[in-house]
Amino acid sequence: MLTHLATALGVLGLLTVVPGPDMAVVTRRALAAGRGDALRTVGGITTGLLVWGALTVAGLAAVLAASPAAYLAVKFLGAGYLLFLGAQALWQHRRSATAAATDAPDVTGSPWRTGLVSNVLNPKIAVFYTGLLPTLAPPHLPTAWAMTLLVLLHALLTLAWLGSYVCLLSKAGPVLHKPRVRRALGRTTGVVLIGFGLVVATASG
């Protein structure tokens, strides 16, 4: 069992640290609203993983992963949300570039909800949880308990990784608060979010 858990932790850890939409969403929130909002966004993302985990244990995520129509619906909703966040970031930093003040542009909406929605509307999580996670489950545990354990481990790894990333960004605050650097990073984050949105929209199931 320990060998299975060590293997699962290694795979989950690698999947967690690979940059993706979650990191881009957190970066955008950190640049625009600071450490507190970014950490609340991380909390929303982690909650989204727990939602997918609960759906997986209940068998609903497998239905989504197996249904082309449902998968496409969630895929396009998720892609549209990432495109919206990217366009919003570009617009806000365009406005800040012409403003006299050098403060970060305001962001609207709850940071926790932003993280939750961006994660819940990611159908790849459903495919990952129903396709790969069962292969990592310790064989000596009942399936439901094994899946629950792996989902909790993935959520904890995500919380630790993205939380550490936010703390790293906050330590670089003096550099990131320079208007030129902030605008450049804001634009880059906006472009990255739009890129991820296009990737999600055009990816095959």
Image (cartoon, rainbow, N blue to C red):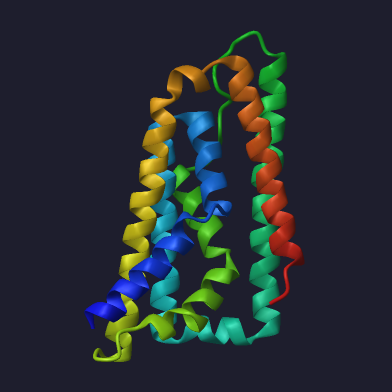
* Residue at screen point 56% across, 38% down: 28
Position of residue 174 in the picture relative to residue 106 (left or right) = left
Residue at the far top in the pictured view: 100
Image: 26 above or below 136: above
Q: Nearer the viewer, residue 177 or 48?
A: 177
Q: Quadrant of residue 93?
A: top right
- Where's the C terminus, which quadrant? bottom right
Image: 64 above or below 184: below
* Residue at screen point 68% across, 59% down: 79
Image: 189 above or below 77: above
Image spot of residue 46 (x, y percent): 39, 57
Position of residue 159 in the picture relative to residue 32 (left or right) = left
- Where's the N terminus, which quadrant? bottom left
Image spot of residue 10 (x, y percent): 37, 67
Q: Nearer the viewer, residue 95 or 131?
A: 131
* Residue at screen point 48% across, 63% down: 15
Image spot of residue 184 (x, y percent): 66, 26
